[in-house]
Image: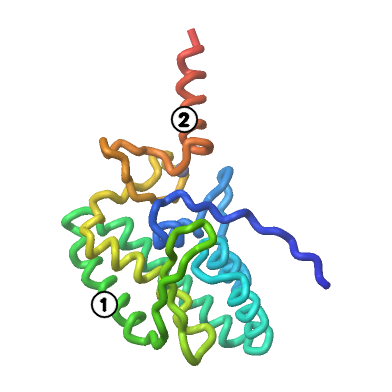
Amino acid sequence: MPTRVPGPAPVFIAGRLWLDFVNTDDARLGQRVDLLATFSAFVEWLAAAQVIDPDRASVLRRRAVEQPSGAAAALVEAQRIRALLRQLADQGRDARGALTRAHVVEELNRVLGRSVGTRRVDLTPEGGYARSFVPVGDAFGGLVIPIVESAVDSLVRGELGKLRGCSDRRCPRYFADDTKNGKRRWCEMKTCGNRAKAKRHRQKAVP
Ligand SMILES: [Zn+2]
């Protein structure tokens, strides 16, 4: 068995699946980190996000060994969708984003139009419910569908005004601000929020 070098752990802080997906193109300690660098990293992320269960993850890993070109194409498609969704998070927030939104919607429909599969709702071990999409046919087709559907949910609910980029300009993360006062500024308190707090503290300490 080859040793598996663990990549950086995925972070789920955005409050929406599609924004967490956008945030897989991340930066940590000033270094760019791509959590979708390989197909197997993409599968890891989908499993960590509970979009697929562990059984499906192992089936996908096996298929990827048998059909490397199919897996590579699915990865390219996932990265393309991620770039598209970043545009939506970025420019969808203001009125000038109308053209971007129209373009993104067209692309989202292209992905949704290609999907053939079954939608399910299942009980989770924690006692909640999880929606899933089980594609038929091509094992790799449809992996991005739950992500795209989460973006569609945000569009339909009119949530684009709630989307924020982290207030630390070096941080590329997005999140949905679900706070009552709409004043969430940081992707996470334990990273960017605390860094800013420590900086303010240091500035105060200087006489
Ligand atoms: Zn941040």
Q: Position of residue 59 (x, y in %)?
A: 63, 81
Q: Earlier in the sequence, mark 2 or mark 1?
A: 1
Residue behind mark 2: 196
For label 1, count other residues whose C-alpha is less than 10 Å away and answer few (under 14), some (14-19) or many (20+): few
Q: In the image, is residue 39 above or below residue 50?
A: below
Residue drawn at x 23%, y 60% is 157
Q: Is residue 166 left or right of residue 201?
A: left
Badge 2 vs badge 1, beta-carbon distance below 8 Å: no
Q: Position of residue 202 (x, y in %)?
A: 51, 19
* SS for callout 2: helix
Residue at the outermost top position: 207
- The quadrant of the image that shows the N terminus is bottom right
Q: In the image, is residue 59 above or below residue 126?
A: below
Q: Position of residue 173 (x, y in %)?
A: 44, 50
Disc marking residue 40:
none
CA separation in Å, label 2 and label 1: 39 Å
Q: In the image, is residue 159 above or below residue 110?
A: above
Disc marking residue 106:
1
Q: Is residue 175 left or right of residue 195?
A: left
Q: Position of residue 165 (x, y in %)?
A: 36, 47
Q: Quadrant of residue 80?
A: bottom left
Q: Amino acid at mark 2?
A: Ala
Q: Amino acid at mark 1?
A: Glu
